[in-house]
Image (cartoon, grey):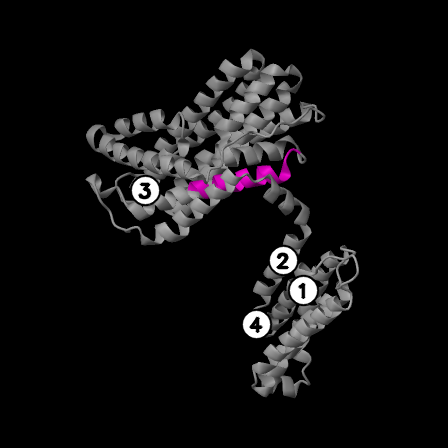
Amino acid sequence: METALLQNNGIEALPQFLTSLAIGLLIGLERERNPSAKAGLRTFALVAVFGTLAALLATKLGSPWLLIVGLIAVAGMIIAAYLNTQGDEADPGTTTVIALLLCYGLGAMIWYGLSTLAVMLAIGITALLYFKPELRGFSQSMTRRDLVAVLQFSVLTFIVLPILPNQDYGPYHAFNPHQAWLMVVLISGISLTGYAALQVVGTRYGAPLLGFLGGLASSTATTLIYAKHGKSNPAMSNLAASVIVIASMVVVIRLMVVSAMVSYGALPGLLPVLAGGLVFGLFVALYNWRKMDKATELYIPETSNPAELHTAIGFGLLFVVVLLVSAWMEDFAGSQGLYVVALVSGLTDVDAITLSSLRLFNLGQLSEHQTVTAIAIAFLANLAFKFGMVAFIGGKTLAKHVATGFGAIACGVLLGLFAL
């Protein structure tokens, strides 16, 4: 690289410096919006370019210490700037200081051929800075119970999971402690994402997003809450039906993601079945959305934190039981036995039987057709259970609105299943 730079007067380094400039401007643009910040567009852009320049000089001179000296120089200038204005009513500047130091580091990364990673990090840093109000609101809305649950889940994920034996035990060699807990982490992680997003966005972004996030956290809880509100307030019947249908459509998306992560080999057979339900349901959801009164008050589903210890362990036990029973029933009564287990377990939890079927498929104990059929039956059973909940709690009017969407989703799944 050095020889090329010497032969071309360094012009080949221009793209790296332009990328650094763009990164600095991106982060600086967000800081410019903060009146109390001591650094804005120009400062961040110059610091990023300085990081690239320091890396270039360190490479040419063969002295990596120049990078350290540059970092110390940037830190010193930032500290001096804040000390000179410490009497002013301004923010203490810790966020801006660390953002400037990161900007310097990103500039250096670009010179060392890590441009793509540097740009990705810059976008993430900018988003983190921009969403300060939302993040602060989320942290303040967290209860002590939520924080304890997240800490417990972190310990069980990053400390316990790595030490669990990754070996098959029990009948049919179906039980693997490491794999079982990994499935718990996967499902709880997806649900936790929806739960956290619900706390951040609240009701500001409308029913479609609320239904989507509610479906990620818990489609059953979302159905229960909106069935109650749909009955108590007839004016929001269309809105409640839309949220319920969208939440159930998200279950299809969850199953796609889980299948792709756990057993990619089963995805080609499973995808047409799930895609059929998603597409058919989407048409009905869009139709209902156009008829809905957007001024109707929205309610946030009151779901429990999926990272709570008892919730995670409860799902883990359910997964293991369903896994062993499925393996035994398939061996004892063939496909019909497996489908009975799928029908019964799918009524309240479609995730457990889905993961169990995919696990048995990976072990070679189930064919692709059996796996897809079991998952489809579990999903349809879960859909029927939630419709019964709507009819019993929400009344006939809400049930009629929901029936169209649920019927469309079920028809799409069945058409995809019969096409296998």
- Kind of residue sitting beneath label 2: Ile
Q: Which residue does the image show at 24% across and 30% down from the upper left?
A: 329
The mark nearer the N terminus, 3 or 4, is 4
Whether residue 300 is situated above or below residue 183 in the rendered picture: above
Marks 3/2: CA distance?
38 Å
Where the N terminus falls, by quadrant? bottom right
The mark nearer the N terminus, 1 or 3, is 1
| SS at badge 1 | helix
Q: Which residue is mark 1?
A: 97
Marks 3/4: CA distance?
40 Å
Label 3 crowd bin: few (<14), some (14–19), many (20+), radius 10 Å: many
| SS at badge 3 | helix
Foreground tag (1 vs 3): 1
Q: How many marks?
A: 4
Residue 359 shows which numbered tag?
3
Query: Magenta-highlighted stretch: main secondary structure?
Result: helix
Whether the magenta-drawn stretch holds residue 194 is answered as yes
Identify which residue, 293 or 392, lies in the foreground.
392
